Amino acid sequence: VVQAGMGGGLSTSPLAGAVSAAGGLGTVGIMPPGEFAAELKRTRALAGDAPFAANLLMPFVRSAHVEACLRERPNVAVMFYGFDAALVRRLQHAGITVWHQVGTIEQAQRALTDGVDGLIAQGVEAGGHLGGAIPLAELLPAVRTIAGERPVLAAGGIFDAASAAAARRLGADGVVAGTRFLMTPESNAHAEYLDRLLAAKDTVRT
C-alpha cells in the first residue's frame, strides 16, 4: 500500500512517516525545494528503517528538488506528468528506485523506454492531477501486459480493502491511495476541505 504524494503541503513528513512506519510506503509531496528537502529529512527520521518515497511532479521539479533527493536518498522517487530519461538514470545511479505514474499506454511505453523500475497505472477514477481518461479496469491490464517483470501498481478509486483486492485481481502488484489518506490526523488538509470531500456525491473533472 502506497500513499500518493499529494503536493501543496498536503502530504508532509507526519503523514509520509506514519504510513511508512505502519508498514506502507509513505510519500512526501512536491513543494518548494527548501521545504521539500527538510520534509524528506524529517520523514527519514520518522520512518526509521522503513522505506519512503518522494513525489516528483515534473512541471514543478527544479534542480534543487533533484539535489534534495540525491542528498536525502528516499528509497523511491515517483515521476509524473513529464519525462526525463537522464533524471531516471541519475536517480538510479544514486540507489533510488524510480517509478513513473502513467495514464495511457503511450505514457507507459515512454516511461519503460526511459528505463524506470516500475509503473503506477492511474485510472480516471483518481483525484488530483490526472494523466489520462481511461478507467483503471481497462488501463491496468494493458500496462501489466507491456511492463514485463517490472512491478505495476494501481491508482484511482482505491480506498478500502475491497477496492485494493479488486486491483490485485486485475494484475496490480500493489495499490496507491491519495484521497483516503487525506482523512487522517497526520494529513495537512484543511478541515473544511475534508468535510466537503466527505459530503461530495460526484467527482468533477476540471
Image (spheres, helix red, strand yellow):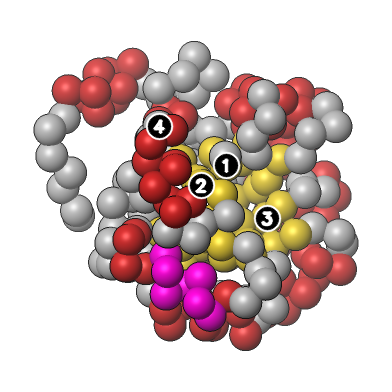
- Tell me whether circle 2 and circle 1 mark residues in contact (CB < 8 Å): yes
Indicate which disc residue 77 carries.
Answer: 3
Tell me which label, 3 or 4, sits earlier in the chain.
3
Residue 12 to residue 128: above or below: above
Determine whether the residue tagged by mark 3 lies in a helix, strand or loop: strand
User: On residue 2, which mark appears?
Assistant: 1
Q: Find the magenta span and give its range.
A: 140-146
Residue at the outermost front position:
169
The residue under the point 69% across, 78% down is: 115
Nearer to us of marks 3 and 2 is 2
The secondary structure type at the circle numbered 2 is strand
Amino acid type, label 1: Val
Sequence-earlier tag: 4 or 2: 4
Q: Is residue 88 left or right of residue 3?
A: right
**Quadrant position of residue 147:** bottom right
For residue 179, side relative to residue 176 (left or right): left
